[in-house]
Image (tube, rainbow, N blue to C red):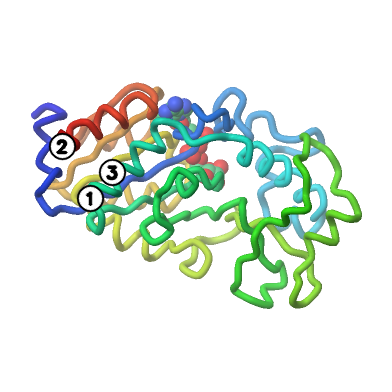
Amino acid sequence: MDTAGLLEPFKDNNKRITVLTGAGISAESGIPTFRGPEGYWTVGSREYRPEQMATHSMFTQNPWEVWAWYLYRHTVCKNAEPNSGHHAIVRMEELFQDRFCLVTQNVDGLHLRAGNSPERTYQIHGNLNYMRCSGECTPKLFDFPKGIPDKQKDQPVTEEEKELLTCSRCGSLTRPHVLWFDECYNETWYKAESAMAWATSTDLLLVVGTAGATNLPMQIGTMVARNPEAVIVDINPSDNPFRQFAARHDRGIVLDGPGGQFLPELLSLWET
Ligand code: APR
């Protein structure tokens, strides 16, 4: 069955839709991916191996090196704008309402900035627009401090900025609200169980711009691929495990190209 034949029925078949996104959807907004040629894990920082920066153990040893790196990444995300792919996903939520859920690995906050609702958006790796107490004195998320200016790569954190990156409740250091490589998914910070519960009972899994290198998204893909009735769509200009899920699935669709092009096209199937 062709793409339209598989997808049009979702217009009004009362079935569940999950959109799962990775860094690729923000590439067209100018935010580097992680594992692409200019990716954060490919380029990394001057002193350290890339992934090292995104670990709790590194934060414990060199908190200001890690903060300097995240302040730079926050600057990149803050100065980026949602693209046509993000806007198409907002429109999908408007169309499908409670049948819709967005699971994103992105910490750039562009989905919420584009207009997706916090209630139906699971940010399973956190969001750089928030920080939290590294001593975990409270489960509360703090807004990113307004007093911190845009930062260049490898630009050190000033004493004034260090003041702003201190927990207002207990005086401990704060940390970026992101999931690090040596940490586990959980429900409190990352809504991991909620995302898993919804996504594994989905009828349509629409995957955009991920290389499938992280655990929870791959578990979701594996579970949905076991359901012969489910439809799996992968949008990505490169091969990746989700493309393989879709290619091997009877009700699978592989769209070999950018999210900014294919997402509006899919949306048009449901808007007519
Ligand atoms: N449209 C769709 N996909 C794209 C586009 C685009 N315009 N540009 C690149 N891609 C694809 C790439 O081909 C690649 O498969 O996006 C994917 C990006 O992969 P990664 O850089 O590995 O990013 P992601 O899969 O989101 O990484 C997952 O790993 O490093 C951790 O926490 C980090 O959230 C991140 C997670």
Circle 3: residue type: Met
Circle 2: residue type: Leu
Q: Secondary structure at mark 3?
A: helix
- The answer to whether 215 is drawn above or below residue 195 in the figure is above
Circle 1: residue type: Phe
Q: Secondary structure at mark 2?
A: helix
Of mark 3 and mark 2, the one earlier in the sequence is 2
Q: Which residue is label 1 attached to?
A: 96
Q: CA distance from mark 2 to mark 1?
A: 13 Å
Q: Which residue is label 3 attached to?
A: 92
Residue that appears at 68% across and 77% down: 137
Q: Which residue is label 2 attached to?
A: 7
Q: Secondary structure at mark 1?
A: helix
- Where residue 234 sits, quadrant-wise, is top left
Task: Residue 115: give x, y in percent of width and height.
Answer: 42, 47
Q: CA distance from mark 3 to mark 2?
A: 13 Å
Pointers 3 and 1 in contact (CB under 8 A)?
Answer: yes
The CB of the residue at mark 3 lies under 8 Å from ligand 1: no
Task: Residue 140: give x, y in percent of width and height.
Answer: 60, 71
Task: Residue 263: give x, y in percent of width and height.
Answer: 32, 31
Q: Nearer the viewer, mark 2 or mark 1?
A: 1
